[in-house]
Amino acid sequence: MNTRCFLSIFFILLNLNFISTICPKGTIEGFDPKICYKFFGAPTDFLSANITCQIIGGNLASINSAFINEFISQTLKDSLADPTIKTWIGGTKIGSTWTWIDGNPFSYKNWAKGQPSSGNCASIDPSQSVSNWYSNDCQTNMPYICEVSAAEDPCSVCPTTTSCPVSVCPTVSPIPVCRHGYSYFSQWNSCYKYVNAPLNFEAAENYCINEGGYLTSIHSPDEQEYIDTLSHQYGDGPYQAPWIGLRDTGNDLSLPFWFWTDNTETTYSNWYPGYPTNGGGDSGCGDMITSGSPWNNGKSYWENDNNCDQTRPFICKQAPICGSG
């Protein structure tokens, strides 16, 4: 084997030790490619900001090096209409000790002169050349930046070489793969996620869209059963009532006018007897009562008794991110 061929194979084997990662939809890859970030410009208090970060699978950003501090600072400068506005990061004071809200050690510090002072929650000022941190009252409303972990990219393929006819890469599995947090159902070649963080119908739909899908549609008894099982696995209590993608935006809430928000055909129905019904107000949003309830002989069914502004868990559905073809 010639030297060039040997070196090619050596570097391919070396690269197999590195796992490619992928950031969730709507986030950007950070200085560390295993960490992704998302900026939110609507000002809110520290606790509410972190709850939003948790809904997307993360926490307010922690900063453990000058490189990450500079990356976050530049990201905020590019995102803020006014770069002099302070932005929440994940530093918080517990007792007399500062810590990161995600549990990471508070080893790197970049406090401004005289800081920290009063206030138990940390912000960053990206307008400064060194982007110092400040302690603030946790009830102050500020923009914020979340961090989430990147997932392994199951669609990444092993590098190949044409310099010699030796294959050292493993065979890429043809099995469809879902994004992190989603479960695959082969009968419908789709991925599903039960989100146990109550939102109203519109916010739930936007969450699913942001992740690359929609509130779930249901097209057969086996898909209904799969979603019912998923709901019991991740939901609370003896039965659940999550939003699904049923919608009727007109004044007449009779059957012909209901549709799935993912624009698939309404080929299957599992309404409770006598439903859908015009319950008054905005009842043009559908939810699913899972098995185990005291109604319908304990079997799962659909209903539209709830105003679309009510908050409840929900189920997202999307196509696999690779291998579905």
Image: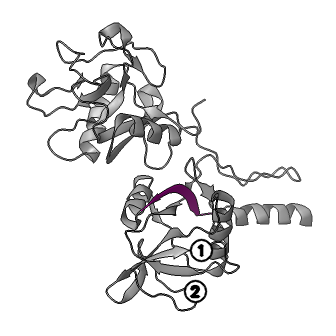
Within 10 Å of disc 1 (Cα), the crowding (few <14, some 14-19, many 20+) is many
Give the alpha-carbon distance from disc 2 to disc 1, as whole Å: 9 Å
Q: Nearer the viewer, residue 156 or 104?
A: 104
Q: Which mark is residue 125?
A: 1
Residue at 63% over, 73% down: 68
Position of residue 202 in the picture relative to residue 299 (left or right)? right
Residue at 21% over, 47% down: 236
| Residues rendered magenta in the picture | 33-44
Residue 177 seen from this side: no
- Residue 15 lies, in percent from the top left, at 71, 63
Are discs 2 and 1 less than 8 Å apart at CB?
yes
Identify whether 71 is placed above or below 170: below
- Residue 92 lies, in percent from the top left, at 41, 77
Residue at 40% over, 35% down: 202
Q: Nearer the viewer, residue 43 or 229?
A: 43
Identify whether 124 is placed above or below 80: below
The quadrant of the image that shows the C terminus is top right
- Residue 237 lies, in percent from the top left, at 16, 45
Q: Which mark is residue 112?
A: 2
The quadrant of the image that shows the N terminus is bottom right
Position of residue 114 in the picture relative to residue 162 (left or right)? left
**Three-letter residue code for mark 2:** Ala
**Three-letter residue code for mark 1:** Asp
Q: Nearer the viewer, residue 8 or 313?
A: 313
